[in-house]
Structures are given as C-alpha cells and as structure tokens.
Image (cartoon, rainbow, N blue to C red):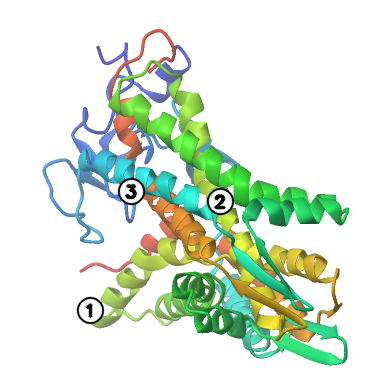
C-alpha cells in the first residue's frame, strides 16, 4: 500500500499549518509555532467556495449589462458598459489597449468563474478529470484574477481627472460596484478552498496519485 | 509512478518531512542548489527554494521604498489639459473621487490595493527586520513579530501596484482621445516604488522569516 500510492500528511499523522507552513502532529488543534487553528482537511471550505462562486456568477450579469461609466461630452451623455467601452477603443484603433482591457475585464472574470466551477465540480461530483491539469489551472486562476482590478483603477483615474461639468465629465455607474464584488468574491472563493480535498480520492485512469 | 519512489521511501524520516500545501503529499526535504525550486512531484506546486533572504539587502530596499512612497502618494500621478482647464490627481484623490460619487466599495478597493496595502507591507517588513536585527527577544516583540508574519501574505496579495502602473497607461491612452495627457514626477515615483517593492518581495522569504522566531 505505501509503495503503491503516495503518502499524504494525514497518512503519516501530520498536518500542515496553512498560515506559517509549520508541520504539526495531526492530533493538535492549533499550530505549535503560530497558534493558528489547524485542520487536516477543511470539508466546509467546499461549500464556502461554492457559495462565493455562485454569488460571483450572479453578480457577473449586472456587471456586464449595466453601464460602468457615464461620460458627458459637450452635453451629450453616453452610458458605457464594459463591452461598449472596448468597442469604442477598437474604433479608435487602440488595439493593444483594447486587448488588455478585454482580457482583464471580460476574459479573466469569465474564465475564472468557469475554471473554479469545473474545479469545484471535480471535487463535489467526483468527476474523473486529470488532477494535475486542474491544479495548474487553479494556480493560474489564483495569479491572474487580481488583474481584473485594472478596469476599476482606470475608472477611478478617469473619474478623478475628468470633471469639467457639461464640457467633459465622467462618472462611475452601477456596474462598477457589481464588478468590484465579482473580483472580490472570486478571489475569496479561490482562497478559502482547501485544495487538498481534490487529492484524497484515488484516480486510477487519469492520473497517478 | 516509478519517479515517485525516489521521493517517497517506505519510511519517511520524520525530521525532514514536508507537506505540499496544495495536495498534502508527504515529501522528503533535500538540499537544493541555488536558483532551483522544489516542485511537488504530484501536483507541481512550488514547495520550497533556497532562501536568498539577505536582511541588510531588504533593509536597504525598505528604506528606498519608504522614500519613494511619499512622493508617489503626494505628487499628482496624472494631469490632463482640456480646453484651457487643467486637472491633476494623486493616487489617494482617485479613490476620494469615486467615494464622492457614492461608489464606496470601489473606492475602498482602490485605496486598499494601491495605498494602504503597499504602505503597510513596507512598514511590516521594516519592523520585522528591526526585530531580527536588534535581536529583540522579549515576549512583546516576539508576539508582534509573529503577528506581522501571519498577516504578511494578506498584505502582499492585497497590494496591486503593478496593476495600477498598467492602469496609468490604459487611462492615458483612453483620455488622449479628448485631451492632452501629462505624466509627472508622481508617476515616475510610483513606477519606481512598484519596482522597489517587486524586488523587496523577491528577496523576502516568509519561511526563512518564520525560522527566526525565538521561542523559549
């Protein structure tokens, strides 16, 4: 048995502290170095993660339907959603900027939600998916997710300098809050999840375990 | 599977065992050459590397970061000229502008990730270095040290200077359609602050810092 399968911490009676990465005996409730609470597995984290992810998925709809900025240019008011903002950039022939904004505000949130949903389903419904690829995807999601903040920073900068009344004026609009919450909730969903849960089940066909 | 037998002898030596934080695999810790990272043989998460955590180097970077933090946050980072009127904004004022339009969640996100988190990160590392360098071993200082280490990861995840730097570019290109854009000393300081913090974070090794806790 020991040579056939990889030994995990819980098989050898040890538990990693998630905060300071100290290794503790499995019967302890708190880390001996940093006194944080430790658990060999956090089964509840799966539900937390699902809840946060579903909320984020729902908020993604208002974030994309409602306008994210209101621009007044010489008395003419335009409501820009995330998508029309990018279309506007394409019309101005600013392709590199359009690609950056498209990636940060449309592609990344969407892929993050879909990716996390696949990852969580693989744990919840015991889907026979290759775990190594899932884990790589998860690390990419963790790293790239923060880049969605780009759009909010751009809005904040624009709103701060463009305030000349009827001549030229920019205001944030309701989608900004929804979008901020989508970023926050998806980042939290990835952070609270105990990824060790994926690796407990043995998968003989797809991955060596 | 035969590749794993090397990492997983039948009887793991209890003293040098480490566990993968992503998949809980038990791996025998071995010495590594410099510039090499140990990856988990099962899920390829980075496990550990050789700490290149020079306290004096970090102290120098910390002081440099503090010096650039002040102009980066006090000087305007973006200035536009439009039909004779001039508008300039500092990083802090961008958050205030959004707050004044009642989008306070967005404002908090901006101020936390562009001003508060980087500032607290620099101060936190500075205090850690002072505690280690002056060998402050009383219970109070050791408790403070542990508390700083515990919050380090949160602060470094919250600080998003690199994204803010890119957002200058995007905002400048966006606005160049209407108005003339000027980037000043504030922008330069902010860019340098980003670089200094980037190097500081590369130098910093949380596990190495945990190793310097003095327990009685």
Using the numbered discs, state the Cα–Cα distance from disc 3 to disc 2 in whole angstroms.
Answer: 26 Å
Residue at figure coordinates x 38%, y 52% from the top left: A188
Helix, strand or loop status at disc 1: helix
A123 relative position to A42: left or right:
right
Does A99 sit above or below residue B1? below
The residue where tag 3 is placed is A192
The residue furthest top is A205
Camera-side residue of B195 and B11? B195
| Quadrant in the rendering for residue B73 | bottom right
The residue where tag 2 is placed is A64
Quarter in which the N terminus of chain B is drawn: top left
Tell me whether circle 1 and circle 2 mark residues in contact (CB < 8 Å): no
Q: Mark 3 lies on which chain?
A: A
Counting from the top left corner in percent of width and height, residue B213 is at 32, 66
Residue at figure coordinates x 44%, y 25% from the top left: B42
Of the residues under marks 3 and 2, which one precedes in the sequence?
A: 2
Mark 1: few/some/many CA within 10 Å (<14, 14-19, 20+): few
Marks 1 and 2 on same chain = no
The residue where tag 1 is placed is B139
Using the numbered discs, state the Cα–Cα distance from disc 1 to disc 3 in whole angstroms.
Answer: 31 Å
Using the numbered discs, state the Cα–Cα distance from disc 1 to disc 2 in whole angstroms.
Answer: 52 Å
């Amino acid at each position: 048995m020991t040579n056939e399968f990889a030994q995990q911490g819980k098989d050898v009676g040890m538990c990693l502290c998630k905060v300071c990465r100290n290794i503790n005996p499995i019967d302890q409730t708190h880390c001996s170095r940093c006194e944080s609470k430790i658990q060999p597995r956090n089964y509840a984290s799966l539900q937390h993660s699902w809840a946060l992810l579903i909320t984020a998925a729902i908020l993604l709809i208002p974030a994309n339907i409602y306008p994210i900025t209101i621009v007044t240019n010489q008395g003419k008011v335009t409501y820009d959603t995330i998508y029309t903002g990018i279309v506007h950039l394409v019309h101005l022939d600013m392709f590199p900027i359009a690609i950056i904004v498209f990636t940060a505000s449309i592609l990344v949130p969407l892929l993050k939600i879909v990716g996390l949903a696949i990852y969580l389903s693989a744990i919840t419904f015991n889907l026979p998916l290759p775990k190594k690829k899932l884990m790589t995807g998860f690390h990419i999601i963790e790293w790239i997710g923060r880049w969605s903040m780009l759009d909010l920073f751009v809005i904040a900068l624009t709103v701060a300098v463009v305030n000349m009344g009827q001549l030229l004026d920019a205001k944030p609009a309701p989608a900004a809050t929804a979008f901020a919450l989508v970023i926050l909730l998806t980042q939290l969903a990835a952070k609270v999840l105990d990824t060790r849960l994926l690796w407990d089940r043995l998968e003989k066909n797809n991955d060596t375990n | 599977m035969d590749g794993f037998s090397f990492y997983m002898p039948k009887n793991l030596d209890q003293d040098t065992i480490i566990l993968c934080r992503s998949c809980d695999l038990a791996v025998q810790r071995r010495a590594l050459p410099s510039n090499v990272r140990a990856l988990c043989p099962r899920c390829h998460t980075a496990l550990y590397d050789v700490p290149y955590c020079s306290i004096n180097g970090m102290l120098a970077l910390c002081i440099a970061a503090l010096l650039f933090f002040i102009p980066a946050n006090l000087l305007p980072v973006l200035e536009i000229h439009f039909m004779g009127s001039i508008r300039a904004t500092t990083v802090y004022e961008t958050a205030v502008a959004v707050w004044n339009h009642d989008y306070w969640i967005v404002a908090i996100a901006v101020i936390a990730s562009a001003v508060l988190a980087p500032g607290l990160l620099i101060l936190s590392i500075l205090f850690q270095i002072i505690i280690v360098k002056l060998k402050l071993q009383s219970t109070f200082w050791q408790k403070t040290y542990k508390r700083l280490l515990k919050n380090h990861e949160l602060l470094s995840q919250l600080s998003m200077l690199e994204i803010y730097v890119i957002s200058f570019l995007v905002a400048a290109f966006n606005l160049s359609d209407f108005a003339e854009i000027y980037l000043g000393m504030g922008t330069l300081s902010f860019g340098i602050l980003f670089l200094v913090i980037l190097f500081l974070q590369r130098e910093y090794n949380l596990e190495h810092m945990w190793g310097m806790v003095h327990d009685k």
